[in-house]
Every structure is written in structure tokens, then in C-alpha cells.
Image (cartoon, grey):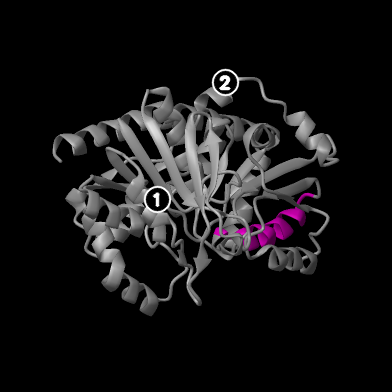
Amino acid sequence: MKVMQVTPEFPPPLIGGGGYHVYNLTRELVKKGIEVTVFTFNSTKNSFVAGKVIETQFGNVKVYRFPAFPVPRTIYSVAPTLMPSLLKEETDIIHAHGYQFFTSDAAALMSKIRKKPLILTLHGFPRGFSKILHRTYFNLIGKKTLKTAKKIIAVSNRVVQEFKAIDVPEEQITIIPNGVNLEEFSYALNGSNFRESLNMKENEKLILSVGRLEEIKGFQYLIMALAKIQSETNSVKLVIAGPEFNYGQQLRKLAAEMKMQDKVIFYGPIDGKEKLNALASADIAVVPSLYEGFSIFLLEAMAAGKPVVATKTGIALELIQNGKNGFLVDSGDVENLSEKILTILNDKKLSFSMGQKSKNIVGAFDWRKIAEQIISLYKQCLKNA
């Protein structure tokens, strides 16, 4: 079977959860003997000026990176050379990722022209368009892309509900969540090295949060919560790890205004073994987002056996049993966020119990199992083509 993965991002670099998803799915598909080709944007700055299609290798997988330029006043980017290359490629299945991306719209057009089944994975509902711009996009392009998909995969029930609200038929949607590489968490991890790299004292507690530095991730509320936590204990540090994106300067300014600049560490992008060691070193993981389709960091923290505090958005509502394997709080509720973090930090027995319960839940999200579900959907679509 030949599968084409069409996605706005594919590491390196790793920007968001969608790219992480495609990366791990591709790796598992190849292990199972499926031939995969990846088509994505060139994520370097001014990629359109460079003007070249870059071909790289991910193991035995060819990855084509296309120069793209943004449409003014939108989050939409266009890659004019993508479509001709898609049409040249031989494939059995076209698997596109994300809604309101040129990559998915081009994949849908190719599906119609080449009569190949399109699978579309929805990682969340986009937040970067105004209502007027979204309505325009939906009526002109988005509705056609969604209808072209033979099957739509949603990563959580929250995502299903969001797309049902714009009249996507529920019978067209299958829920297949993101996964986690549980093998990586079966080895002994070295958290002490990570703590040493931050010059942390032995008695200091480490709060870890990972994601792009943008407003929707809610790190501003976590910094405010830290200020409240500091009023009760002075032996805590907060590590926020992720690429700069568009909100880092505001977060640093807020930390300074709250007099938390010495307690908040902006670590930058983190992945692979470095992220695993960071998780091993953490006393608690926090997901303070205003919106999430599916927080992969939440899944990783659970796999690492860490107690979690998360806002009531995305997969957290389905994964966290409030008070048993973590705490759920309302987005932006600084008081409750600080209270729940302190509860865990001050209770070693509760912390350990929550972490163990999370490890028991997360087994169903092993990437090997997730890949099998997606392959089964591929076969179903080919059979009914």
C-alpha cells in the first residue's frame, strides 16, 4: 500500500502537535511495510523567497518541503508548486492533516482529479480566522474539502462536536486519538541532569509545561498562578518549554511584572530524550490552555507517571478523572489553578497515586495501536472505493 501524507508541518523543526502526529504515524506505517511519502511546507522563514522545493529523507521516507507564502491578514499560506507535485505522485491513499490549510485543500483537489480516497485528520478547530473570514473560506473552499474526504478522523470528541456544528455529518467522522511512544517511557530516565542544567536546588519543586508560546496556550495564567504559589512556598520553579511563536515577549514581560523572572524558565523548543528527561525531573505537569484539540504533552506526562493539572478543554475532559489521576480547572481560573498545583506539590502520597493511575490509563494510546486503527481505516476506504 502506498500512502501520501500531506501536512502543513513535519519535523524538523517541531512546531505543533499536528507535525508530531504525522511524524509518529509515518514511523509506525513504515514499520508495518507501508510505503509513505510526505508533502509539507518548508517551515523556514522567507521560504517562498528561497523558491526551491527541498527533498529530504526520514529513514526510507521521502519528505518534500514546498516554499509557501502567507495570504495577507489570514493564517492561510499558499504553496503554488505543491499541486503539480501531488499530481505526479503515485499513491493508493491520500491522508491530509488539518482544516483550513492549503495542504488539505490541495489534497482534496488531487483526490477529485485522480479518483483516490482522501482521509482527513482534524487536529482541532482553527482559532486564527475571524468569523467573517472563516465563513468566506468555508463557503468557497472548506466545505468542499470536508465533503471530499472519504473519511474524517477527529482526535477527540471535542473536535467532533466542533465540526458537527458546521454541519459535518457525524457518520463521516471516526475518533482516533493521538498516540504516545510508550517504549520511550519504559527506560530509566535521568531527571537529575535536567535539574542540574537549570541550577535547581535539591529541595526545589519543578512545575513543567510544554507548548508553543502563544496566547491560546494559557501560559500567562500559569505565571499568575505561580505568583500565588510563591506566597506560600519559595521553593518552586516553573519551566515553560516550546518554540517562541508569537507570544514569548509578552510572557517574559508578565513574569517581570509579577516579579517572577527568577522563578520562570523559558527553556525554548524541547523534544526527544531531552523532553523525556524534563518529564522525569518534573514534580507536576500543567496544561493551562484556553483551547486544545488534543494535548500530546498531557498524554506524555501521564505516560511518565506525573500528576497533572489541566484546563477543561480537548482530550483532558476524557483522560482526567478529576481528583483521581489529576485535577481539571476552568481556563483562566488562576485561583483554582494555583490551589490545585499546591495541593499536589504538598501531598507526596496523592502525587504518586495520581501518577500511577495515569500510567494505567495511557496504555490504550500506544502509537502502535493507533497506527493499526488508521491502517484499518485505509483498508476500509480502499475496499469501498
Magenta stretch: dominant secondary structure: helix
Question: The residue under label 2 is which amino acid type?
Answer: Ser
Compare residues 293 and 347 and report the one nearer the observer: 293
Question: The residue under label 1 is which amino acid type?
Answer: Ser
Closer to the N terminus: mark 1 or mark 2? 1
Q: Quadrant where the C terminus lies? A: top left
Residue ID for mark 2: 186
Q: Which mark is residue 376?
A: none
Q: Position of residue 327 (x, y in %)?
A: 52, 46
Q: Position of residue 75 (x, y in %)?
A: 48, 68
Per the image, label 2 sits on a secondary structure element best described as helix
Instruction: Give the crowd class for mark 1: few <14, some 14-19, many >=20 residues within 10 Å.
Output: few
Q: Quadrant where the N terminus lies? A: top left
Residue ID for mark 1: 85
Residue, x 44% and y 62% (percent of image)? 80
Mark 1 and mark 2: span between their CA atoms?
Answer: 41 Å
Residue, x 79% and y 53% (percent of image)? 263
Relative height, residue 290 to residue 154 (above, below): below
Is 118 included in the stretch rendered in magenta? Answer: no
**In the figure, residue 5 lies in which quadrant?**
top left
The span shown in magenta is: 217-233
Per the image, label 1 sits on a secondary structure element best described as helix
Label pair 1/2, CB-CB below 8 angstroms: no
Q: Position of residue 231 (x, y in %)?
A: 76, 57
Compare residues 94 and 182 and report the one nearer the observer: 94
Q: Position of residue 85 (x, y in %)?
A: 40, 50
Is 224 included in the stretch rendered in magenta? Answer: yes
**In the figure, residue 25 lies in which quadrant?**
top left
